[in-house]
Amino acid sequence: MKSGSDIHILIVDDVSENIQVAMNILKEESYTFSFASDGQEALDLISSNDFDLILLDIMMPKISGFEVCLSIREIEHTKETPVIFLTAKTDADSVAKGFDVGGTDYIIKPFHANELLARVRTHLELSGTKKELKKYAEHVENKAKLQAIRLSKEIEENQCEMIYILMEVMESTSDETGQHIKRVAETCKLLAQKTSYLSEEEVNTIFLASPMHDIGKISIPEDILHKPGKLSEDEMTVMKTHAEKGALLLKNSKRRLTASASIIAHQHHEKWDGSGYPRGLKGEEIHIFGRIVAIADVFDALTHKRQYKDAWSIDNAISYISDQSGTHFDPALVKIFMDNLPEFLEIIRK
């Protein structure tokens, strides 16, 4: 808390003798002073200085003390500055108006030295304590926010870890690998970052939720899931149910990640031209998360070996993505993919 010469007091009075009397009394405490002889001069000083307390006469020409006080309360850095009115008016209406316009206290002229010293000291101490409490409250609030962010991040990291464990268990029942879901997640994140319309939170959501895109496969019979050759028409019909079943597994959650994962599981096999499954959605009817995962999942699947196929060359996989622009894939996303191809290739080579 400030003391002595660190405390800056503004005295405003159109009678210079009153200013001098106040200064003579208060200099016992070694305060620093500024003074003004009218309201406008006071406001000019206040706009460019930080005062710890203002002693303000009420009856002044041009602008009254009441009007000056109202203006003080509208200036950001003086909203909380204590204002003590100096007045010869002792009627109840004047006193009440002083408090109504934002005054902190009032002192009757002529001054009594002990009263002036005591009132000024009291309000400086109260103001100082208030500032310290406000600073402490802001510190506590900021600390609480940082703790909440840290805890939220830890929870999200734990969720992410559990997601990957769950997905690796699920992938171990098929011919895919845990690395597939990690590459798909990183590809989705990069593609989402390159758009101009997804927020940082949305980018993070798709990164964390996309690993669950094929969770519905846990409901597919092993003889179909593990079949080394091409699936029959009936078997493919069963395989396609994994999109619907994945969405059903996740749909009742109110948590952001799980709700987003439900959308992704349901829509990542939809196609831009409406020929996909399970609902035949078309164009922007498909959620942006589903459109992004569609590209990431197909590109990674093409460039890596599976039980039923060998890995495609990177050039052939790139050509496929390009050729399917506007049919299978969102053309705007394909353009982003092509424009930033070296970064996507770094991910699929991991």
Image: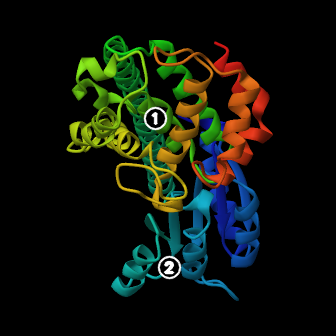
Q: Residues within 10 Å of mark 1 (few under 14, many from 20)?
A: few
In this view of the protein, can residue 195 be seen by the observer?
no
Q: Which mark is residue 88?
A: 2
Q: Give the image quarter of residue 96.
A: bottom left
Residue 127 in picture, x, y percent from top left:
47, 48
Q: Is residue 30 left or right of residue 271?
A: right
Q: Who's the residue at 37% across and 25% down the image?
A: 151
Q: Residues within 10 Å of mark 2 (few under 14, many from 20)?
A: some
Q: Give the image quarter of residue 350.
A: top right
Q: Nearer the viewer, residue 112 or 65?
A: 65
Q: Which mark is residue 246?
A: none
- Kind of residue sitting beneath label 2: Ala
Q: Who's the residue at 53% across and 18% down the image?
A: 309
Badge 1 marks a residue whose secondary structure is helix
- Kind of residue sitting beneath label 1: Asn
Q: Nearer the viewer, residue 182 or 85?
A: 182
Residue carrying label 1: 142
Q: Is residue 159 above or below residue 31?
A: above
Residue 245 in picture, x, y percent from top left:
25, 38
In the rendered picture of this protein, how many numbered marks are placed on residues?
2
